[in-house]
Image: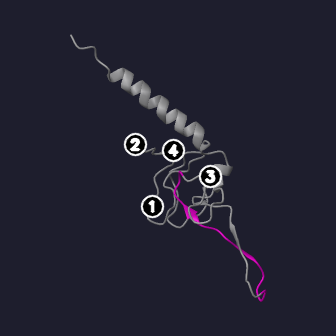
Amino acid sequence: MWGAIIMIYDDGVKMDDDMRVKICPRCGNEVMFTHSEYCKICGLSLYNYCLGETISDPSGSYPDRIEYHKNDSDARYCEKCGQPTNYFEEGLLKIWEDAKNLIELNEAEAAEDNFEIPF
């Protein structure tokens, strides 16, 4: 039987309780006001929103609207609607295959560094 492989894609930045980043992932700015929504240095959204899910009114009484969801800073796709996130679209996050390969390479190198030949 195959064992589960746990991959932790930890390429995001720390966030507060409102899912706002504490450090801008684009420029590294750490100075922002409590209610800021965009980085004052580079203009990036401090929230990793998805690109939006179209919500339609089945009765046709109301026009379609787009709903945006907040995501973790390392999310490439929204867990609610599956749409890409703005941080992924901006190129701030590697595609998951490249991130996975990098994690595995780093783990293999760390294992080699810790390998000792018994005498």
Badge 2 crowding class, 10 Å Cα cut-off, few under 14, some 14 to 19, many 20 or more, is: few
x%, y% of residue 106? 46, 30
Residue 87: mark in rendering: 3
**Is the residue under label 3 in contact with that under label 2 (CB below 8 Å)?**
no
The numbered mark, 1 or 2, whose residue comes first in the sequence reads: 2
C-alpha separation, residue under disc 1 versus residue under disc 4: 16 Å
x%, y% of residue 58? 73, 84
Q: Callout 3, which amino acid? A: Tyr
* Residue lying furthest left: 119
* Residue wearing tag 2: 3
Badge 3 crowding class, 10 Å Cα cut-off, few under 14, some 14 to 19, many 20 or more, is: many
> Taking the image as drawn, is residue 35 in sight?
yes
Q: Which secondary structure, mark 2? A: loop
Pair 1/3: label in front:
3
Which color scheme did the rendering employ for the protein?
one colour
C-alpha separation, residue under disc 3 versus residue under disc 4: 11 Å
The numbered mark, 2 or 3, whose residue comes first in the sequence reads: 2
x%, y% of residue 60? 78, 86
Q: Does residue 62 belong to the magenta stretch?
A: yes
- The boundaries of the magenta stretch are 60-74
Badge 1 crowding class, 10 Å Cα cut-off, few under 14, some 14 to 19, many 20 or more, is: few
Instruction: Indicate whether 30 appears above or below 117.
Output: below
**Is the residue under label 4 in contact with that under label 1 (CB below 8 Å)?**
no
The numbered mark, 1 or 4, whose residue comes first in the sequence reads: 4
Quadrant containing the C terminus in the rendered view: top left
Instruction: Indicate whether 85 appears above or below 2.
Output: below
* Residue wearing tag 1: 16
Residue 95 placement, left or right of 105? right
* Residue wearing tag 4: 11
Instruction: Indicate whether 9 appears above or below 79.
Output: above
